[in-house]
Amino acid sequence: MTFDHETLPLLAEALKDLDAGFDRLPEVTPRVDVEGIRRVLNEVAERLRDNYPYQHPQYIGQMLKPPHPVARLAYSLAMFVNPNNHAMDGGRASSRMEKEAVAGLARMVGWEEHLGHLCSGGTMANFEALWVARELQPGKAVAASSQAHYTHSRLSSVLQVPFHPVPVDARGRMDVDALEKLLQSESIGTVVVTLGTTAAGTVDPLDRILPLREKYGFRLHVDAAYGGYFRLVEDLREETARAFAAIPAVDSVVIDPHKHGLQPYGCGCVLFRDPSVGRIYRHDSPYTYFTSDELHLGEISLECSRPGAAAVALWATQQLLPPVRGGEFAAGLEQGRAAALELHEWLSGDSRFVPLMEPELDIVVWAMWAETASESSRRARAFFAEAERRDVYLALASFPRGMVEPAGAVGDWDDESVVCLRACAMKPEHREWMRAIAGRLEA
């Protein structure tokens, strides 16, 4: 059995408790075709078997982490009401829960005062941050590292803002000297700093970029969709810890609770240090904002209808597992990072594998040693397929020569990029399973 069955009775208990809150209303008998639903649901289960086993520790490929049981149950419970967190009259309780949950994330990054809300994911969260930046720095460009998420160049195009990629060093971190040269030659209004690239998990040196803001006057946005929760981890490398420690000074931050935050899709969060940027969202609605004088979340969001269930699930998870240093939630992150370091160490002891760098967070990337770059890529693809046949599920990622060559994985460069293998040790269980996973990779 790979799925949680033990907690399902808790949903029935909680649903009865929820129902009791509405017992003043006349009785309504739901019209439910139980047999029809059973037939379709069983068909759904059959169809869903056509998936990688994302929930199992031997799936270590992409950033796919199963929600915590309390998140699944709270989300399901909220779906019986199906609240809409655009306005208070569509989701009164869930809107307040969203505000509390978002405040918890703001405190995690070091802000008591803030403006923020949940959204569908990192793409929408980054879009809102870049949109606000464009309104505050009209006519100016966006800069992000060449290893930043591809969404930034796409979103800049949608916003009709020029975009400039900044070169990276051999570890995939933004080159600060290259950034300053760009700032001297171009009109840059926003610099996107990535704390945890989704390809290799590398962390841009935010602490070294901050002084440039004072000199050149740009807005500083942190894309921590993947890595934001690692601010809670106490055993990071010193330079990585310095970057996370600098977050409170930036202008905006994006975090994805549906990555390390144990939430279902989609649950992203955008946070602004200065609450006054809410004026940029200002708009009027003829029929949604009349039921309460409280802030309606639709008044500070580009999205209109938004699932209140996502806020309920996040709130519930943070009640059980507060996002604080030294807590159970932070320990889970540390277990995943320890698993990544263990895998890196094992790979380093075999000459067939060439890790590109020591993991900064919990992503491990390695190339296959070969005489040529094209042969290294071919071997990586073959290894990926063979690992799947042995029930270990990895991922593939292409990296430029500048990140692979220093590791010494290739003899002759007949291509300017190499396809490498990638593992995301995001589950706490990966620590206890890593020896078994390594054994399968060895085979």
Image (tube, grey):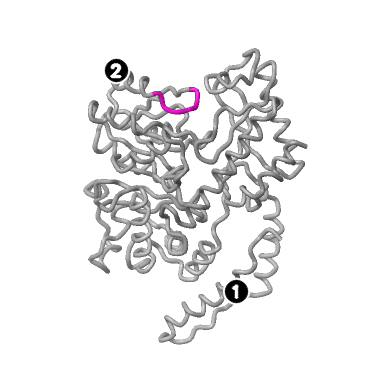
In the depicted structure, whether residue 299 falls above or below residue 435? below
In the depicted structure, whether residue 304 falls above or below residue 340? below
x%, y% of residue 142?
34, 30
Q: Nearer the viewer, residue 388 or 107?
A: 107
Q: Amino acid at mark 2?
A: Ser
Q: Is residue 137 left or right of residue 38?
A: left
Judged by depth in the image, the label closer to the viewer, 2 or 1, is: 1
Q: Nearer the viewer, residue 11 or 138?
A: 11
Q: Secondary structure at mark 1?
A: helix
Circle 1 crowding by C-alpha within 10 Å: few under 14, some 14–19, many from 20:
few
What residue is rendered at 73% in x and 45% in y?
Answer: 391
Q: Where are the magenta residues, as a range?
A: 170-175
| Res 283 label | none
Q: Is residue 382 left or right of residue 61?
A: right
What residue is rendered at 33% in x and 53% in y?
Answer: 107
- State the residue position of label 2: 185
